[in-house]
Amino acid sequence: MVILDRFTLNLPLATSHNITKWKVNDLFVLIVLVILNVFVYRIEPFQRQFLINDITLNHPFKDPQQVSDLDLFVYSLIIPIGIICFIVLLLANTQHRWYLLYISLLGQGMAFIATCLFSNFIKNYIGRCRPDFIVRCQPSMDALPNVYYRADDICLNPDRSVVLEGYRTTPSGHSCESFAGLTFLSYWIAGQLIIWNNQLGIWRKIISWLPLLGASLIALTRTQDYRHHFVDVIIGAIMGWFIAKHVYRLYFPSINSINCFKPLLDDSQVLTPQEALSHDMAQADEFQLERR
């Protein structure tokens, strides 16, 4: 006897076509993820032991950062939203313009917020020290080298939040979130510009790759500011790319698909590139016949 149905999990399915098409459940999930992210970020990280003479943790504390948290939010979410709105306005057929915009923004938000939540949870659980941890800690003069301590044992910095933030290095949040937001944008642009068609020019591919270059530059600043170890940045980049890629495929077909510019549940009668070309050629033939 089956306890749970594999397809429905004994949950009621949406009976309305519009609820399914407009991904109302996904919008609700996105709101829940935003709320959860606020609570997860407030959780104190695990305090992993460290040595005060560990040279990998004795780098300077750089403030301000090259890319602040606000800058990251703008580069990885706000600017991609603006680019999506502009391209939809420029290229989308009126038959599906609003639906394409809605699904695109939902996917962009889902990729960014899901990555934020996952990276914050992992960082708190791992509790690895940042490269500038000793400066953040301001250890007691009585602390001995080659002896393992926790922050609460010897750190004298009155700003405890600065010390605890020093335990959130793996994975790099900037790397995760920049690659999540800008990878989704990269895939989305690739789909909208139909890069699989080699007759349309390599410049379309180059444009679609540019967001990944931006994500890489943001991630590398974290090593220049000594906020993260190189491995933190690499792990963060892989996580962000992986989540964004899979979120994109939840809403859009493969970028190699003939309908790559249309959301998966788009039931509008917008023509594919081949259909549009055939339609234009047929109209041209009809025009030539009429002239004869």
Image: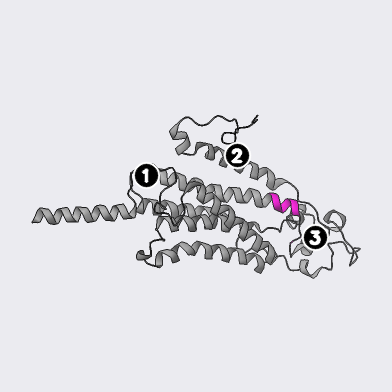
Check disc 2 and report the residue beneath it: 32
User: Is 39 rendered above or below residue 222?
Assistant: above
The part of the image, by quadrant, that contains residue 180 is: bottom right
Name the disc covering residue 96, or none.
1
Amino acid at circle 2: Val
The first of marks 3 and 2 along the sequence is 2
**Mark 3 burial class by Cα count in 10 Å: few <14, some 14-19, many 20+:** many
SS at mark 1? Answer: loop
Say left or right for 39 vs 188. right
Say what secondary structure mark 3 lies in: helix
Q: Residue 146 at x, y = what percent? A: 89, 67
Residue annotated with mark 3 = 137
Task: Give the residue drawn at x 55%, y 29%.
Answer: 12
Q: Could you tell me which residue is drawn at 29 percent across and 53 percent down?
A: 276
In the picture, measured across the screen, residue 75 lies left or right of residue 202, that is right
Residue placed at 61% from the left, 42% from the top? Answer: 33
Residue 129, magenta (yes or no) = yes
- Measured from the top left, where is residue 111 in percent x and y? 56, 50
Q: CA distance from mark 3 to mark 1?
A: 55 Å
Label 1 Cα crowd, 10 Å radius (few <14 / some 14-19 / many 20+): some
**Which residue corresponds to the image point at 9% horizontal and 56% vertical from the top-left?**
291
Type of amino acid under label 1:
His
Mark 2 or mark 1, which is nearer the start of the sequence? 2
Earlier residue among tags 3 and 1: 1
Q: In the picture shown, does residue 224 fall above or below 15? A: below
Is disc 2 placed on a helix, strand or loop? helix
Front disc: 1 or 2:
1
Instruction: Identify the main secondary structure in magenta.
Output: helix
Q: Percent from the top left, x then y, of residue 189?
A: 44, 57
> What residue range appears in magenta?
121-130
